[in-house]
Amino acid sequence: MAFRGVDYFAVDSLFTEEELMVRQTARRFADERILPVIRDCYRDARFPKELIPEMADLGFFGANLEGYGCAGMSNVEYGLLMQEVERGMPLPGLYPPNEENKARYKAWTEGEGADR
């Protein structure tokens, strides 16, 4: 059964249609791709690297940055994305888009030309 989420304070009514679509895409990915493999990955002490290409195709990497092939999501959309993916992969510090975003953001805000 797919995760339906909880919304005790009717927060969903504050999100735009696009924000809800981002969350639903990430939720579906977590339910269909992460959750079926994460227990074995935890047991085997490995990261599910096979999911990285799919995550890239969905725009999860550099999601809240604009240009340079990044998705250009709002910070709200990025937060909803992270919330759903972290539900399936609960180690956000080890989650590649989290670490990768930190590096990309620094290059994006302080870099010049090819550094970006």
Image: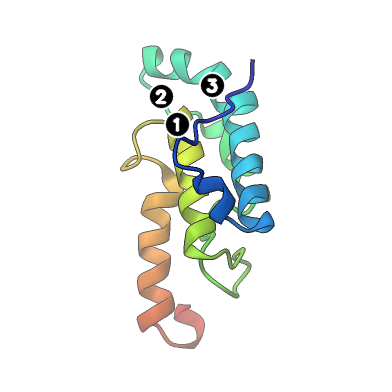
**Sequence order check: which comes first, mark 1 or mark 2?**
2
Q: For the point 44% across and 77% down, which residue is it? A: 108
Mark 3 residue type: Leu
Q: In the rendered image of this protein, does residue 7 appear above or below residue 115?
A: above
Disc 2 crowd rating (10 Å Cα; few below 14, some 14-19, many 20+) is few
Residue lying furthest left in this view?
A: 93
Q: In the rendered image of this protein, does residue 61 appear above or below residue 42?
A: below
Q: Which of 109 and 15 is in front in this view?
A: 15
Mark 1 residue type: Arg
Q: For the point 50% across and 82% down, which residue is it? A: 114
Q: In this view, does 19 lie to the left or right of 83?
A: right
Residue 35 tag number: 3
Q: In the rendered image of this protein, does residue 61 appear above or below residue 85?
A: below
Give the Cα separation between the discs numbered 1 and 2.
18 Å
Q: Are marks 1 and 2 in contact (CB under 8 Å)?
A: no
Give the Cα separation between the discs numbered 1 and 3.
9 Å
Q: Are marks 1 and 3 in contact (CB under 8 Å)?
A: no
Residue beneath label 2, please? 46
Q: Nearer the viewer, residue 89 or 77?
A: 77
Residue beneath label 1, please? 87
